[in-house]
Image (cartoon, helix red, strand yellow):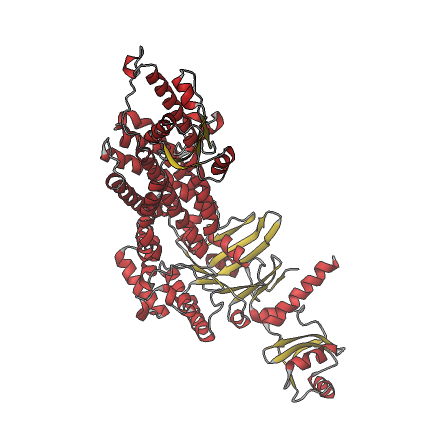
C-alpha cells in the first residue's frame, strides 16, 4: 500500500533542500505573524475628538478634561461651528465631536438638566460602540456624583471579574488565532504545489507508469511537509510567547500534539487541491479559496455565536474552526484534553477524510 | 480502408509459434474523450524484439495509444495485452515489465543524474546491490559515466534523452514505449539514440516508438500509420512501399533533381502525366503516369527552363506512402 514511500520521501527532501524557495519557508510565517500580530489590535483608545465648546466656562473645560481622562478620547482640536464639526468628521480628522451648549454651566448651577451632544462616526462599529459606552458612562457617573452618590453606595453592586485575559488585551485573543490561520495558509500551499509541480513538469506521468503506490506517493509527499509545518508551528509559538508576551496557560506538549493533528487535514486539503488543479496558478487560486472561509468563518475575526445560522453551520466544516478552539483553549484558558478531545477528534476525522479523498481522486489515472 | 501487409509465409504451425513470441497485441482499441474519438478501432500485433514505429500527424492519437498500452488511460472499448497480460485488469503486473519515455523530458531537473537513476531504481523496488549493478550497466550503455554528479537541468537535449532512457531501462523492461524520443535533438545525438535502440532490440527488448522522422521509420521492423485516429496502414516498410494503392497500375515513381527544386515543383505539377509531386530533401518525388518516362520528363523540364535536370526511377519512400495513403483516405472521406 505504501510501496515507494521511502524513495519518494528521499527525493522530496532533496527537492526541498535544493529549492531556493525553501529559504523563505520559515520566514513567511514569521513575517506574517509579526505583521498581522501588530496590525490586528481592537483595543479602542485615544479616538481623535474635536470639541465645539459654546459654553467656555470652568464647568465645560472640566467636562472636556474628564472626557480625555477616560483614555478613549484624544482632543485633536476645537471647532467654532456645527459645519466645522461636521466636516472634521466627514474628512476623517476626528471620529467624535463633542458639542457643549452655551447654557451648560448655568443649567448645572441651577440644578436643571444639561445636554451635551456627542456625535460619533459610526462607520467602524467597534470603535463607535466603545466610544458610545464610554461617553454614556461618563454622563452617568458625573450625574451620580453631583447628586452625592458614590458607586460604593449602590444597592446592587455588580463586580465583574475577567478570567484569563484580565487586561482585555486583544493580542492575547488574536495572536493564537492568527497562528492557526497562518499555519493553514502555509501548509495548504506547501502540498498543493507539491503534486501540481510534478504534473506540470510531466514527471507525474512517469511516476504513474511505475509500480509506486498512490499511498506511497501521497505519504512520501506529506511527511516532509508535515515536518516543515511542525517546525513552523514551533517557531510561531515561540514568537507568540516571547515577542507578543502571550503566555501558554495549558500544556505545551498537548498543544504541539494537537497542532500535529491539525496539520494532517491542512496538508491533506493541499493534496486534494493538487488532484484537481492542472497547474500551479490553479492550485494557487484554489488554496486562496480555502483561506478566506478559514479567515472569516472560523471565529478568528468574528465570533461564531453571532453568525446567522446557515453560516454558523458552515463554520463547522472548516478545520481551522476546531484548531482555533484548541489554540485558544490551551493558550488562553489552560484547557486540557478533557475539554478539547471532541475538537481533536473532528480534526483527526477531517485528516482521514482528506487522505481518503486524495487517494480516491488520484485513482482516476491522469 | 485498412491496408495490412501480411508476411508472405503464414502457415498454421508458424502462426502458433508466433503466439509465444507476441509482445503487444491490441484488439479494436477505441478511446473517446467526450464527443472526441482520439483512437478508433486500432488493432495490431507486435512481436518480441521488434522495433515498432508508430507514425501519424500530431493529434492523430499516437500518445493516447501509448498511454492506453501503459495503463495510464483506459480504453473506451477493445482490449490490449502486453506480454500476455491485460492492460486494464493487470496494470500493476504490467508496470514492472514496461519502460516509458514520455514526449517531454520528465525527470527531475533539480536532481543529479545519479540521484535520478537511484530514485527510479528505488521506486521499481531494486535493492541496493541490484541497483548498484544496474546503475553501472545502464550508465555504461548510454554513456553517462562522467556526468553522474551533474544536475539533470544542465544536460543537453541528447544527454537528457540518454538519462531518460537509462532510467527506464533500470528495471530491465521487456517492452519500452518511446514517445518521440528524438524530437528536438541534434542529428548526431539522434543517431546515437537509435544505435542504442538497435542494441536493445537485438537483446530481445520490444520497442514501441513514435516519431515524425521518416528515416527513423525506415529503420523500424514494422511501421503503422495512424490518421484521424484510425490506423490506415501497417506492415514492414518495404512491403508498404509495394502497396498497389501507392503505385497504381501504369504509374511509376521518379526522383527529379535540378539546380532549383522549388522552382521545378510547380512546373512538374502542371504536367498532365504527373499524378503527384512533393519535395523530398533536395529532390522531387513524383508519381508519373505512362507513357511519360524519365527521359520525357527531363525534356519537359528543360523546355520549361529548368537547369541541370536529372531524373531516375526510384521506389516510393515511406513518406510517399503515407502522403498517398492520407490523400486516398481524405478523398474517400470526402466522397462519402
Q: Is residue B64 left or right of residue A36?
A: right
Q: Quadrant of the C terminus of chain B?
A: bottom right
Can residue B200 be seen here? The reply is yes
Residue B12: percent from the left, percent from the top?
54, 59
Front position in the image: A125 or B42:
A125
Front position in the image: B263 or A180:
A180
Placement of A6 over or under B209, stated as above or below = above
Residue name at image x 28 percent, y 21 percent: A161
Res A14 → quadrant: bottom left
Residue B237: percent from the left, percent from the top?
56, 69
Can residue A213 be seen here? The reply is no
Placement of A27 over or under A49, stated as above or below = below
Residue name at image x 44 percent, y 24 percent: A116
Placement of B285 over or under A172, stated as above or below = below
Residue B247: percent from the left, percent from the top?
67, 72
Q: Is residue B140 left or right of residue A195?
A: left
Front position in the image: B201 or B169:
B169
Residue B20: percent from the left, percent from the top?
46, 57
Q: Is residue B36 left or right of residue A163?
A: right
Amino acid at each position: 500500500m505504501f510501496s515507494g514511500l521511502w524513495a519518494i520521501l528521499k527525493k522530496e527532501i532533496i527537492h526541498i533542500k535544493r529549492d531556493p524557495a525553501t529559504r523563505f519557508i520559515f520566514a513567511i510565517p514569521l513575517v506574517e505573524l509579526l505583521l498581522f500580530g501588530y496590525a490586528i489590535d481592537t483595543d479602542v483608545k485615544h479616538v481623535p475628538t474635536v470639541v465645539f465648546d459654546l459654553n467656555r466656562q470652568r464647568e465645560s473645560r472640566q467636562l472636556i478634561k474628564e472626557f480625555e481622562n477616560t483614555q478613549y478620547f484624544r482632543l485633536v482640536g476645537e471647532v467654532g461651528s456645527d459645519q466645522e464639526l461636521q466636516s472634521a468628521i466627514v474628512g476623517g480628522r476626528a471620529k467624535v465631536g463633542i458639542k457643549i451648549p452655551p447654557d451648560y454651566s448655568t443649567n448645572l448651577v441651577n440644578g436643571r438638566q444639561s445636554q451635551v451632544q456627542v456625535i460619533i462616526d459610526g462607520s467602524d462599529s467597534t470603535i463607535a460602540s466603545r466610544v458610545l459606552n464610554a461617553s454614556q458612562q461618563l454622563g452617568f457617573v458625573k450625574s451620580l456624583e453631583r447628586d452625592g452618590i458614590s458607586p460604593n453606595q449602590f444597592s446592587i453592586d455588580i463586580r465583574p471579574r475577567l478570567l484569563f485575559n484580565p487586561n482585555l488585551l486583544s493580542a492575547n485573543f488574536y495572536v493564537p488565532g492568527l497562528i492557526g490561520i497562518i499555519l493553514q495558509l502555509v501548509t495548504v500551499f506547501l502540498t498543493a504545489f507539491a503534486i501540481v509541480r510534478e504534473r506540470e513538469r510531466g514527471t507525474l506521468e512517469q511516476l504513474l507508469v511505475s509500480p509506486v503506490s498512490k499511498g506511497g506517493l501521497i505519504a512520501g509527499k506529506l511527511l516532509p511537509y508535515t515536518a516543515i509545518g511542525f517546525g513552523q508551528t514551533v517557531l510561531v509559538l515561540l514568537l507568540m510567547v516571547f515577542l507578543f508576551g502571550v503566555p501558554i496557560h495549558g500544556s505545551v506538549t498537548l498543544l504541539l500534539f494537537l497542532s500535529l493533528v491539525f496539520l494532517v487535514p491542512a496538508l491533506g486539503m493541499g493534496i486534494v487541491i493538487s488532484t484537481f488543479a492542472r497547474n500551479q496558478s490553479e492550485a494557487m487560486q484554489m488554496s486562496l479559496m480555502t483561506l478566506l472561509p478559514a479567515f472569516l468563518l472560523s471565529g478568528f475575526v468574528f465570533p461564531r455565536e453571532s453568525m446567522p445560522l446557515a453560516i454558523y453551520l458552515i463554520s463547522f466544516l472548516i478545520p481551522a474552526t476546531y484548531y482555533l478552539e484548541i489554540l485558544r483553549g490551551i493558550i488562553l484558558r489552560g484547557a486540557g484534553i478533557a475539554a478539547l478531545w471532541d475538537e481533536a477528534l473532528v480534526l483527526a476525522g477531517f485528516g482521514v477524510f482528506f487522505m481518503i479523498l486524495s487517494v480516491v481522486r488520484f485513482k482516476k489515472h491522469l | 480502408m485498412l491496408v495490412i501487409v501480411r508476411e508472405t509465409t503464414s502457415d498454421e504451425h508458424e502462426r502458433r509459434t508466433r503466439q509465444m513470441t507476441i509482445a503487444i497485441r491490441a484488439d479494436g482499441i477505441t478511446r473517446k474523450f467526450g464527443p472526441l474519438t482520439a483512437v478508433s478501432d486500432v488493432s495490431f500485433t507486435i512481436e518480441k524484439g521488434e522495433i515498432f514505429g508508430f507514425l501519424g500527424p500530431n493529434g492523430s492519437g499516437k500518445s493516447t495509444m501509448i498511454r492506453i498500452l501503459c495503463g495510464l488511460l483506459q480504453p473506451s472499448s477493445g482490449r490490449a495485452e502486453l506480454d500476455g497480460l491485460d492492460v486494464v485488469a493487470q496494470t500493476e503486473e504490467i508496470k514492472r515489465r514496461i519502460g516509458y519515455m514520455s514526449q517531454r523530458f520528465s525527470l527531475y531537473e533539480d536532481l543529479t543524474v545519479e540521484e535520478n537513476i537511484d530514485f527510479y531504481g528505488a521506486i521499481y523496488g531494486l535493492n541496493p546491490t541490484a541497483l548498484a549493478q544496474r546503475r553501472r550497466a545502464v550508465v555504461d550503455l548510454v554513456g553517462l559515466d562522467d556526468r553522474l554528479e551533474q544536475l539533470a537541468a544542465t544536460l543537453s537535449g541528447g544527454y537528457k534523452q540518454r538519462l531518460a532512457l537509462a532510467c527506464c531501462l533500470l528495471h530491465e523492461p521487456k517492452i519500452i514505449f518511446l514517445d518521440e524520443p528524438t524530437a528536438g535533438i541534434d542529428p548526431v545525438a539522434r543517431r546515437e539514440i537509435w544505435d542504442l535502440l538497435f542494441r536493445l532490440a537485438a537483446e530481445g527488448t520490444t520497442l514501441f516508438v513514435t516519431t515524425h522522422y521518416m528515416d527513423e521509420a525506415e529503420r523500424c521492423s514494422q511501421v503503422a500509420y495512424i490518421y484521424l485516429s484510425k490506423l490506415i496502414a501497417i506492415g514492414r516498410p518495404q512491403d508498404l512501399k509495394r502497396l498497389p494503392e501507392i503505385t497504381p497500375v501504369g504509374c511509376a515513381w521518379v526522383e527529379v533533381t535540378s539546380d532549383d527544386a522549388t522552382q521545378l515543383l510547380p512546373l512538374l505539377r502542371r504536367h498532365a502525366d504527373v499524378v503527384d509531386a512533393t519535395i523530398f530533401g533536395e529532390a522531387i518525388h513524383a508519381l508519373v503516369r505512362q507513357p511519360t518516362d524519365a527521359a520525357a520528363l527531363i525534356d519537359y523540364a528543360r523546355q520549361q527552363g529548368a537547369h541541370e535536370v536529372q531524373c531516375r526511377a526510384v521506389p516510393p519512400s515511406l513518406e510517399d506512402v503515407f502522403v498517398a495513403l492520407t490523400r486516398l483516405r481524405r478523398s474517400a472521406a470526402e466522397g462519402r
